Structures are given as C-alpha cells and as structure tokens.
Amino acid sequence: MSLIDHLDHLVLTCVDVKATKRFYVDVLQMELETFGEGRMAFRFGNQKINLHVRGKEYEPKAHIPAPGALDLCFIAAVPLDRVIERLGQMNVPIIEGPVERTGATRKLRSVYMRDPDFNLIEISEYL
C-alpha cells in the first residue's frame, strides 16, 4: 500500500500572471483563490494549482522553478466535446487530439494544448 493518498496541490511557476490567470480562470473556468500575502491559486474539484511568479517564488520552492516545465492531465467535469467547443470559442489551439490515451485508472479521450508558459495541458474524459 502506498503512503500517499492523493494530490492536494501543485505549484506552477509563470512569467505573466495576467495571461496565466486568463488561461486557467477564463478559459478553463477554474476558481481564482487568493490567500496569505497576495498569493494566488486556481481551484478545481478538491485540488488547486498554487501560482508562483518566476523570480518571486515563495519559500520553500522547487530546486529550479521553471515556467513551461509541466505536463499536466486534467479530467474534465463536462463532456470533452464541450471542452473542445470552449477552447475554440477562446481561440486556444488544440495541438493534438482528440486521441485515446491511458490514464491512471482507465482509458482516456484527450486533447492537448499549451498554457501561456508553454506547459503541456491535457484535458481528458474517461472512456
């Protein structure tokens, strides 16, 4: 049995807060959360993405925090076709998909895009 149950949050390091906020809040419709002394996070489900700005990271931080280094897979709360429609409305190019992939628990149907820092973002639905 694993010692770990689930992921609570992860930290995304960005260059442009405004562009990052637009992508995660306006495009992906995550909830903006502010906390502490001006800190920001994007909440979805029971998880969140804490935001750091390159060169102004909060301690402790990753050894080498780097924008564009993440490859994330999100499970959609709505049918993937609605996600694809939303991405089109918001002029976010899909760089691959829809394609079938293997997720942590079962097969997925996925589309891929880049966020403003060029992190690879996969949005999927279970098959």
Image (cartoon, rainbow, N blue to C red):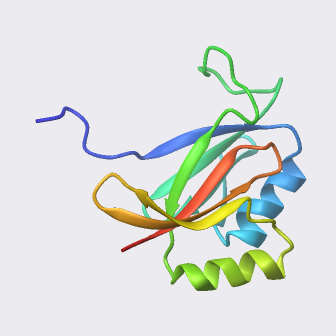
* Residue 106 point in image, percent of width and height: 30, 61
- Left or right, residue 60 beside residue 124: right
| Left/right of residue 125 with respect to residue 20 in the rendered view | left
Q: Quadrant of residue 7?
A: top left
Left or right: 71 in relation to 25: left
Q: Is residue 6 above or below residue 101?
A: above
Residue 46, picture quadrant: bottom left
Residue under the point 56% across and 48% down: 72
Depth order, front residue of 70/102: 102
Vertical relation: 127 (above or below) 20: below
Looking at the picture, how far across and down is residue 69, in whole percent? 68, 32
Foreground of the two, 42 or 67 = 67
Q: Where is residue 78 in the image (x, y as percent from the top left)?
A: 51, 82
Q: Quadrant of the C terminus?
A: bottom left
Furthest-top residue in this view: 63
Return the residue nearer the eye: 44 or 66: 66
